[in-house]
Image (cartoon, rainbow, N blue to C red):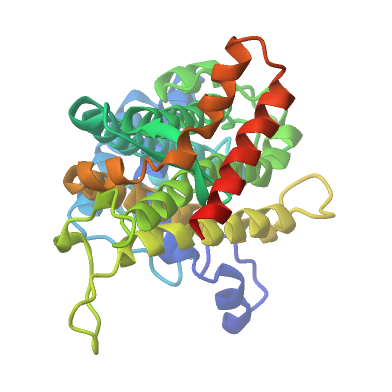
């Protein structure tokens, strides 16, 4: 029997459809729900709902459950549906009536919000660390090859001279933007929703600031309706920030793919980071970079999916919101793996100085030539026209 089930028989097909993949996804959420439940138990003790012995028993049981989860020795059953019910059932089986007290002063609505926010903040820390590793590799490239000059491009055509330092610094700055965006979302997420119940508060006063401190939240949600409205809004903000990293990696991948093209050859990708062709013996393909490049579209799709889920919903909880969980978890995994593989690519990336030098053909310096005339007092547009005329007339002569 489900924890929420009444005397009316419930259709198991309907139950399975409604819970969908919640059980699998909630295994990821379960450790954070356990930690939030320990803090919640402490707050129940603080307001006299739990005796000291009961609190100790619940803390011990939840600590044991965390250990089982870490060892892979605990699963969420079909009957439990989600991690919240699994925790309550586990405590009830272990502690009887003491375990039955754990759901006092909370709903699964504020419970899942709390666990999700804790989980998201934890995942964000991993993403930031991985992004800093990519930045470190770009800075290492600058330290080793930063002075090497090559032809920069606009419209996929040679434009003006640049250097490895300027090129890499551009991506460092862009990734720093993405880190700032994600850290801003983490600050918004760092607010305790426990105690807002199903969105309309509780008949019993709880110390929500105490719980916030226990869980290292910066603040407390001051309105339960806001807490429920926030779910997919925060998910969308989070996905937007995660997708900023994929935007950076998409552009960086495209650069490395183009610049390592044999006929251009500014860069050389380590063969161990490429794949071969099943028919053409000579091929070394930049598949990992192509997949990273493509994942930008995947995360963009998840962002759109989550934004659409909340479309036209009234305030309060709706089961539709559960469908955002998988999109967010998948996005964390994709962004983390993409940052990690980009770090590996950059570690072994070779700069071919001869090819870079060869790319600096005369036309790349024409803008500089025009500005030499400007320094002599020639109006820029006249200087521009003079240099352009000389170049194109010379091109015809060369033909």
Left or right relative to 144: residue 160: right
Query: In the figure, residue 58 lies in which quadrant?
Result: top left
Query: Can residue 88 be seen by looking at this rendering?
Result: no
- Percent from the top left, x then y, of residue 95? 32, 47
* Number of numbered markers: 0
Q: Which residue appears farthest toward the front when viewing the image? A: 397
| Up/down of 321 relative to 276, above or below | above
- Percent from the top left, x then y, of residue 220? 59, 21
- Percent from the top left, x then y, of residue 279? 24, 90
- Percent from the top left, x then y, of residue 198? 68, 42
Task: Give the residue at x 39% y 43%.
Answer: 361
Query: In the figure, residue 288 lies in which quadrant?
Result: bottom left
- Nearest to the observer: residue 372 or residue 238: 372
Query: Can residue 163 be seen by looking at this rendering?
Result: yes
Task: Give the residue at x 71% y 50%.
Answer: 317
Left or right relative to 190: residue 277: left
């Amino acid at each position: 029997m489900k924890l929420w089930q009444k005397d009316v028989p419930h259709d198991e097909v309907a139950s399975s459809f409604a819970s969908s993949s919640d059980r699998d996804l909630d295994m990821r959420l379960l450790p954070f729900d356990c930690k939030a439940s320990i803090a919640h138990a402490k707050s129940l003790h603080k307001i006299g709902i739990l005796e000291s012995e009961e609190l100790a028993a619940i803390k011990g049981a939840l600590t044991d459950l965390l250990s089982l989860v870490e060892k892979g020795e605990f699963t969420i059953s079909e009957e439990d549906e989600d991690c919240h019910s699994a925790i309550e059932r586990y405590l009830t089986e272990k502690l009887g009536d003491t375990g039955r007290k754990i759901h006092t002063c909370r709903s699964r609505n504020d419970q899942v919000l709390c666990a999700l926010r804790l989980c998201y903040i934890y995942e964000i820390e991993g993403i930031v660390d991985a992004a800093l590793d990519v930045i470190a590799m770009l800075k290492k490239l600058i330290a080793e090859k930063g002075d090497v000059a090559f032809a920069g491009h606009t419209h996929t055509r040679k434009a003006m001279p640049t250097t490895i330092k300027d090129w890499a610094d551009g991506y460092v700055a862009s990734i720093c933007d993405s880190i700032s965006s994600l850290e801003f979302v983490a600050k918004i997420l760092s607010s305790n929703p426990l105690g807002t119940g199903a969105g309309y508060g509780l008949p019993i006063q709880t110390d929500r600031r105490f719980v916030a401190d226990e869980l290292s939240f910066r603040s407390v949600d001051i309105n339960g309706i806001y807490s429920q409205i926030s779910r997919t809004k925060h998910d969308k903000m989070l996905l937007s920030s995660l997708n900023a990293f994929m935007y950076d990696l998409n552009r960086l991948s495209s650069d490395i793919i183009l610049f390592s093209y044999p006929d251009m050859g500014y860069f050389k990708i380590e063969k161990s980071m490429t794949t071969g062709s099943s028919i053409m013996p000579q091929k070394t393909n930049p598949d990992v970079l192509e997949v990273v490049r493509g994942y930008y579209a995947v995360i963009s799709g998840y962002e759109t999916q989550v934004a659409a889920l909340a479309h036209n919903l009234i305030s309060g909880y709706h089961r539709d919101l559960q469908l955002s969980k998988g999109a967010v978890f998948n996005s964390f995994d994709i962004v983390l793996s993409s940052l990690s593989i980009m770090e590996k690519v950059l570690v072994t990336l070779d700069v071919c100085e001869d090819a870079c030098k060869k790319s600096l053909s005369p036309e790349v310096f024409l803008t500089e030539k025009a500005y030499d005339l400007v320094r002599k007092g020639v109006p820029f547009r006249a200087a521009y026209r003079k240099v352009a005329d000389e170049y194109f007339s010379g091109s015809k002569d060369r033909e």
